[in-house]
Image (spheres, grey):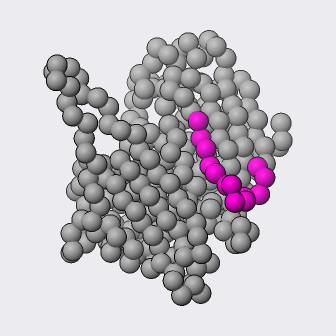
Amino acid sequence: MFRTLQRHLSLFVAVLVLLSGVTLCAQVPLLEEPGYTPTLTFDVATIRLAPPPDANFRVTVSSPPHSSRFEAKNLPIKALLQIAYGYDAPVVGAPDWVGNTFYNIQARSDEAADARLAKLTDNQVRLEKRNAIRVLLAERLELKTHLETRNTAIYNLVLAKGGLKMTPSPAPPPPADGSAPPPPPPVDMAAHGSQHGLEFVGKNVILRAITSSLSSMVEAPVVDKTGLTGAYNYTLQFGREWSANDPDSWPSIFTAVQEQLGLKLEATHETVPNLVVDHIIKPTEN
């Protein structure tokens, strides 16, 4: 069964990565700073093939704020590409192993780099981490890419006629002393596979994170056209290829999104940037 699930596991790894601090970008967009040039690189980095997925399969990514450390377990290189280059541009031209082979990664710089990161803003630290991961991909996997604008099949996420069915997450109450409001509660997303299909359970999730997770399932960009703000709680259950012969299989993802979330995926074509992989090799075990 897990051999059958492996391809689908690689598709929703991007969703599970949302559990980590790395994908705070799903909650707070990373901002380009034209006057700022990141220079961080990793001094030590290991990329090792992970064991085949089993019943205890779990994806973890750890990237502590204001630290050069980056660690990942059971991460496909495609997810690392998305961490380094963003989730909005479809990755095209990559060999199959980029999406369906899992790796364990440990990387860090030195104490001087950590001290420098401690003095930067959160956004600048994320720019530095992104640069370090891009350099790692170029040096260890000989990655060469370019952005190319293509007419691409995408989905617009809109409100369904029946109205929204997700539950708004309650905002933390403002402090009684009038001080700055507390930060929003952390995003919590989990994915579970069964004979009926896949189940996503989300808490405190904004639409940016929801579109990222749906994009990984339909294998196409999903653009938020709902106009919704704030965070939401939801459960989404939908069938996959392996559940097609199950009499109790959950509905298709398109039906489930409409019936369970009160949203709708509308297919269209738009000209969008694609991240084209020109060259990449499998990482060596060191």
Q: In the rendering, at what x and y percent does residue 281 appear? A: 76, 50
Q: Residue at x 23, y 23 (%)?
A: 180
Q: Residue furthest right?
A: 285
Which is more toward the observer, 221 or 227?
A: 227
Q: Give, as a single range, the part of the protein colored magenta.
A: 50-62
Q: Residue at x 50, y 45 (%)?
A: 19
Q: In the rendering, at what x and y percent does residue 55 appear? A: 69, 60
Please determine whether, in this image, residue 41 is positioned above or below residue 279: above
Q: In the rendering, at what x and y percent does residue 282 appear? A: 78, 50
Please determine whether, in this image, residue 181 is positioned above or below residue 72: above
Count of numbered labels shown in the rendering:
0
Please determine whether, in this image, residue 131 is positioned above or below residue 246: above
Which corner quadrant holds the N terminus?
A: bottom right
Q: Residue at x 56, y 33 (%)?
A: 63
Please determine whether, in this image, residue 115 is positioned above or below residue 193: above
Which corner quadrant holds the C terminus?
A: top right
Q: Is residue 222 visible?
A: no
User: In the displayed structure, does residue 253 sit left or right of residue 59?
Assistant: left
Q: In the rendering, at what x and y percent does residue 236 appear? A: 42, 66
Give the overall secondary structure of the magenta segment. Answer: loop
Does the magenta segment cover residue 24?
A: no
Q: Residue at x 29, y 61 (%)?
A: 166
Quadrant of res 71? top right
Q: Is residue 198 visible?
A: yes
Which is more toward the observer, 273 or 174?
A: 174
User: In the displayed structure, does residue 127 sit left or right of residue 51?
Assistant: left
Quadrant of res 224? bottom left
